[in-house]
Amino acid sequence: MADPIIDMPQADLQFGPQTQGEPCFWPLAEAFGPEAEVTADRFDHVDQPSIDAVVRESLGAALDSLGVFDAEARRLAAGFRGPDAQAANGDLVELVTTLRELTVLTAALATAARTDLATLACGSDSATDLLTDVANAVQRLVTSQLNHDWAAAADSLQFELAPSFAGWKSVLDAIGHRYNA
């Protein structure tokens, strides 16, 4: 079964009228190669208090970033509804690129917690379902962006992507509970 946090949409974002950007999201193996694959046994030789500090600090940073992403998604939605949709379009590339980085961090945190996202329960939902919601929101956003449908992009940002960050927070919280157990 595909992991939705790693296998997010492969669509291209347009940076401007003449160029296209890199894929929004890449599978980890494709992005970093097998030599960079994050596995729990790679940490076996490291002092446990050091690992704990890094995991806790990374988890805190990931959780803090979700509030920033929520505010940025809502700001961009307003931008797409305003007179300068092209500026919002440029900022969208940065948001999606940063979401890719949080995707990788989430997968690494789950690995450090020796947690399979496919079986991780987050309240009444599974981590996979919640992260699939984020991936689907990004896919719809990218489709709107590629079609230059700024109203749909704004709606996707405000009503789909921004609210999906609450689910991502639940996933990070669950990973933290598993790690501390």
Image: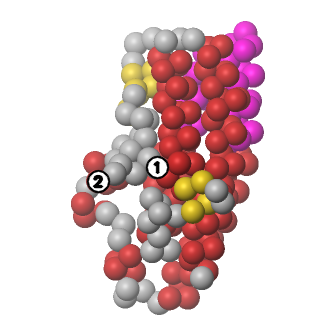
Identify the mark at residue 29; answer none if there is no mark.
Answer: 2
Membership of 68 in magenta stretch: no
Q: Which residues are magenta?
A: 69-98
Against 81, is 180 above or below? Answer: below
What element does badge 1 sit on? loop
Residue 93, percent from left and from top: 53, 31
Mark 2, secondary structure of its residue: helix
Residue 120, relative to residue 143: is it above or below? below
What is the x, y in percent for residue 52? 56, 81
**Is residue 103 depicted above or below 37 in this figure?**
above
Residue 65 in picture, x, y percent from top left: 66, 52
Q: Report, in whole angstroms, how far the alpha carbon at label 2 lies from the one at label 1.
A: 13 Å
Residue 56 relative to residue 51: left or right: right
- Residue shown at 28% from the left, 48% from the top: 30
Q: Residue at x 32, y 63 (%)?
A: 37
Q: Does residue 176 appear to the left or right of 106 in the view shown? A: right
**For the residue carrying disc 2, how many other residues have a C-alpha within 10 Å: few (<14), some (14-19), or many (20+)?**
few
